[in-house]
Image (cartoon, rainbow, N blue to C red):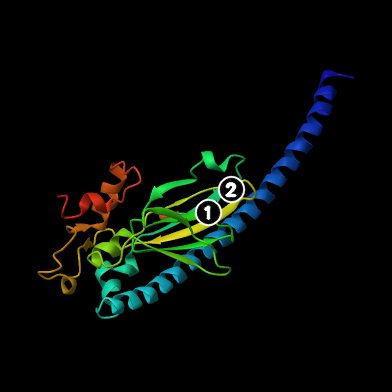
Amino acid sequence: MGLRQRRRRRKLPDRTLAKKQSAAAAGVAKETGAQGESCRDVTNEYCTRIRGLVKELLKGVSESLGLVPCYLEKASELETGLQILIENLYPPCPQPELVMAMPPHSDHGLLTVLMQNNLGGLQVKHNGKWVLVNPLPNSFLVNTGNQLEILSNGKYKSMLHRAVVNDQSSRISIAIANGPSLGKAIAPAQQLVDSEHPPAYCEMTYREYVEFQQRNCLDGKSCLDLVGLSNV
Ligand SMILES: O=C(O)CCC(=O)C(=O)O
Ligand SMILES: [Fe+2]
């Protein structure tokens, strides 16, 4: 067998393999491309619908504060508001008591809409104690955020919360944080401010607030503690 033939022989299977590999890669890319596209479409639609839900919820919240129904939507420029999609996967842990899945924090936006796979793990701070929130099947859980607390001049509190793991099953939570438009200056609603209820928070744009929060190590405290007018 000559060198040429040997080369060819050796090359043949390689080429076939390369061909097969590139065909497979193209198939995978095509599939991933299609999946990626449909994932993007579904995510976009989900975010849009959640914004619609938040708009409705904010109407009720505005009314509960004695404000016109569209107050919070307009005051936050919700239509162009910042939406953040957060996907959390918490695998089971053999020693859950040694692990903090998500450290204590409060969400910086208006309302966070959370979907979870029917496994408890979220805890909220209530009267100084951590309380486990039992998930209700087929329901969303809605957390109030810092910007809602500011706009309502402290009438709606944003709760400190955290997530813990368990030693049995994986927990999944998907949160969409809905905030004001980044450039919008947020301050307590004038109608909720009077001599008995002075403004509890200083005005700042949502962008300034988020940057402030990212710059500060809050150690389980709400960023609001730092921007409250009693502290500035
Ligand atoms: O997983 C959870 O239940 C909490 C998630 C959460 O607080 C967040 O993503 O901001
Ligand atoms: Fe959160």
The quarter in which the N terminus is drawn is top right
Dot 2 beta carbon under 8 Å from ligand 1: no
Residue 115, image x, y percentages: 52, 62
- Residue at image point 61% right, 50% down: 170
Query: Marks 1 and 2: CB-CB under 8 Å?
Result: yes
Image location of residue 86, percent across then percent down:
47, 54
Which residue is pictured at 82% across the width and 18% down the height?
3
Label 1: few (<14), some or many (≥20) within 10 Å? Answer: many
Vertical comparison of 133 with 21: above or below? below
Check residue 69 in the rendering and tell me which mark sits there, or answer none: none
Q: Is residue 75 above or below residue 226?
A: below
Beta carbon of the mark 1 residue lies under 8 A of ligand 1: yes
Residue 181 appears in view: no
Dot 2 falls on a residue whose secondary structure is: loop
Q: Quadrant of residue 50?
A: bottom left
How many marks the image carries: the answer is: 2
- Does residue 196 appear to the left or right of 94 in the view shown? left
Question: How packed is label 2: few (under 14 Cα within 10 Å), some, or many (20 or more)?
Answer: many
Name the amino acid type tagged 1: Gly
- Label 1: which secondary element: loop
Q: Which residue is mark 2?
A: 166
Residue 68 horizontal/vertical position (percent): 25, 81
Which of 1/196 is in front?
196
User: Does residue 83 appear anywhere in the picture?
Assistant: yes
Query: Which residue position is annotated with label 1?
Result: 121
